[in-house]
Image (cartoon, helix red, strand yellow):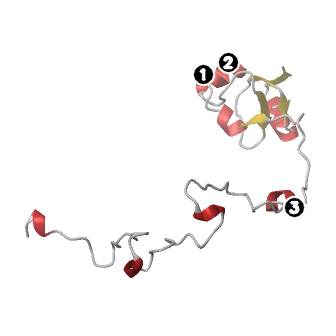
Amino acid sequence: MKLGELQPAAGSTKRRKRIGRGNASGWGRNAGRGEKGYGSRTGSKSAGLFEGGQMPLHRRLPKRGFTNHFRKEYEVLNLRDLVRVEAATIDAAVLLEAGLISNVDNLIKVLGDGEIDRAVEITADAFSKSAEEKITAAGGKVARR
């Protein structure tokens, strides 16, 4: 076999539709654009949601729900994540250095999944009840920033 003899697998390629190249092609005369109207003219473009002046679907459908713009979003940490940090006092700067949070200014919440075996002082914005109990049971302290 030579490079010039290579061919794609049978059925994997399709000939392109040559639109507007005479009636014998099956796509002559109006070239699939229909008879008259805006869409048959050159330069006609239609926005995806435009329905010819009819009230568009996204405006006809009822709107539901509510978005609370004052919602607080926390970066969530579990106790099993905090075990990897070797510092005696853990705050946002230490967590950022350890790669557990993405920004010091974000709100931080500690959850109680996992166990902690040493006394550490943890500073965060919020703690779950189980996390707080486990930290204090291990001899550590909980501080809110």
Quarter of the picture containing the C terminus is top right
From the top left corner, tell me how far across and down residue 111 is, in percent. Answer: 78, 39
* Mark positioned earlier in the residue sequence (1 or 3): 3
From the top left corner, tell me how far across and down residue 13 is, in percent. Answer: 33, 72
Mark 1 lies on a secondary structure that is: helix
Quarter of the picture containing the N terminus is bottom left
Mark 3 = which residue?
A: 60
Q: Is residue 74 above or below residue 90?
A: below
Type of amino acid under label 2: Ala
Residue 96 appears left or right of 105: left
Q: Is residue 42 visible in the rendered structure shown here? A: yes
| Residue at position x 48%, y 74% in the image | 29
From the top left corner, tell me how far across and down residue 128 is, in percent. Answer: 85, 38
| Image quadrant in which you'd find residue 106 | top right
- Number of numbered discs present? 3
Mark 1 = which residue?
A: 97
Cα separation, mark 1 vs mark 2, equals: 6 Å
Type of amino acid under label 3: Arg
Q: Is residue 79 above or below residue 33?
A: above
Relative depth, front residue between 83 and 104: 104
Residue 111 appears left or right of 101: right
Q: Which mark is residue 93?
A: 2
From the top left corner, tell me how far across and down residue 141 is, in percent. Answer: 82, 23
Cβ–Cβ under 8 Å for marks 1 and 2? yes
| Residue at position x 74%, y 25% in the image | 119
Mark 1, residues whose alpha carbon is within 10 Å: few (<14), some, or many (≥20)?
few
Cα separation, mark 2 vs mark 3, equals: 50 Å
For discs 1 and 3, the disc positioned in front in the rendered view: 3
